[in-house]
Image: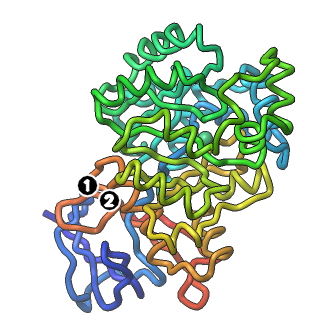
Amino acid sequence: MSLRELTSDFIYLPDGLVSGKSILMEEKSGEIIGIQDAGEQAEYFPGILCPGFINSHCHLELSHLKGKIPPRTGMAGFIQQLQSIRNETEIDPTDAANKAAELAFSKGVQAIGDISNSLVTSTLKRTTNSNLPLFYTFLEVFGLNSMQAPAVFEAGLEKMRQFPNEAVSLTWHAPYSMSPALMALLSQVSQKEAKVYSIHLLESQEELDLMEKRCGPMAELFRQWGFDPLPEWMGKQSVTDFVLAQLPKGLKMLWVHAVHVQGKDIAKLTDHSPESAFCLCPLANQYIHGTLPPADLLWHSGAKVVLGTDSLAGNAVMDIGEELKLLSESFPQIPTSALLSWATGNGAEFFGWQNLGRFTTGAKPGVLQIFPLQQGRIFNGSLIQRIR
Ligand SMILES: [Zn+2]
């Protein structure tokens, strides 16, 4: 057995950043044999060594749309443009998704929670290849027409069979895009399966205006699409109250985006589903809306936070390292160790990937070097390199 001993100025361990330690790793498999005091023979990498990243939310199947939708369209503009160009075929979606997954791995991502509406990534996700991340698929359904809910649900179940069974669940798209009838069908199956689930939530002011006041650009868009009058369930309660009234208690949910989450929402969502996590995708929020999520509020509240990139339709890059840099620069009060837990261990724990996200004996989490740092922090000039 050939071993490597790796050390750095700081090593990110489950209980924080430490100095003077090294990681003992089996060279071929990447398995962590132990953490020990750094010996003189240890290979030294300046900066921080941390486990491979977990991208908890992206849409690989939209990778062929990179650069097609300009920044700052807002939610309604984004949805409208996405619908009209989604099936543009000049770039093959399967090819683009495969390349994006390989690129993500090379940039340090060990595993991905990926949204699918189609079968574009189903072959990719049945492929085992050491240069690819591990996948979990959230097969998302949506539809505002209550009458069509059973058919939409059945079509979702049918698609689900094309993905590896232990790593897929049928899931909610967003509060504004689903009838309570469709949500109820998902609730029934989720209670039986007890897997992990996700929903785009509190992403934009436009979502709040539509769902709470029946006005704004999304209300206009939906009327153009023939929902005139708007569905009767809109405009009656807060987005959070509406969603929690539809979801069974205790599900392992990812609340994706949470840009407009307030303290009272964090408390209600966490109380309803204690094992849930907030998934932040700050670069996509900046790209689509010119906003950032309240990362500091979430950190102070003690909520579980994970990171995602969202899609290349609404983000210039799919790179957790870039998301980390933006958060580190924008929220200097959040400690680096907390940001690293969002990018690594918290995601692994949410998905139940016990061998990932942590430098612990027996795990194979990958090893990344982050360097240089600025006053001990990750900054725009930091480079992230895969060591293993
Ligand atoms: Zn998304």
Name the side, left or right, on which 125 lies relative to 315.
Answer: left
203, above or below 173, in the image? below
Sequence-wise first label, 2 or 1: 1
Place of residue 266 in the rendered image (x, y in percent of width and height, measured from the top left) = 52, 59
> Label 2 amino acid?
Pro
Residue 372 can be seen, yes or no: no
Place of residue 354 in the rendered image (x, y in percent of width and height, measured from the top left) = 25, 54
The mark found on residue 365 in the picture is 2
> Label 1 amino acid?
Asn
Secondary structure found at label 2: loop
Residue 85 can be seen, yes or no: yes
| Quadrant of the frame with the C terminus | bottom left
Disc 2: residue Cβ within 8 A of ligand 1's nearest atom = no
The mark found on residue 355 in the picture is 1
229, above or below 15, in the image? above
Name the side, left or right, on which 337 lies relative to 231.
Answer: left
The structure residue drawn at horizontal position 21% and vertical position 64%, both measured from the top left corner, is 26
Place of residue 295 in the rendered image (x, y in percent of width and height, measured from the top left) = 59, 67
Front-most of residues 298 and 315? 298
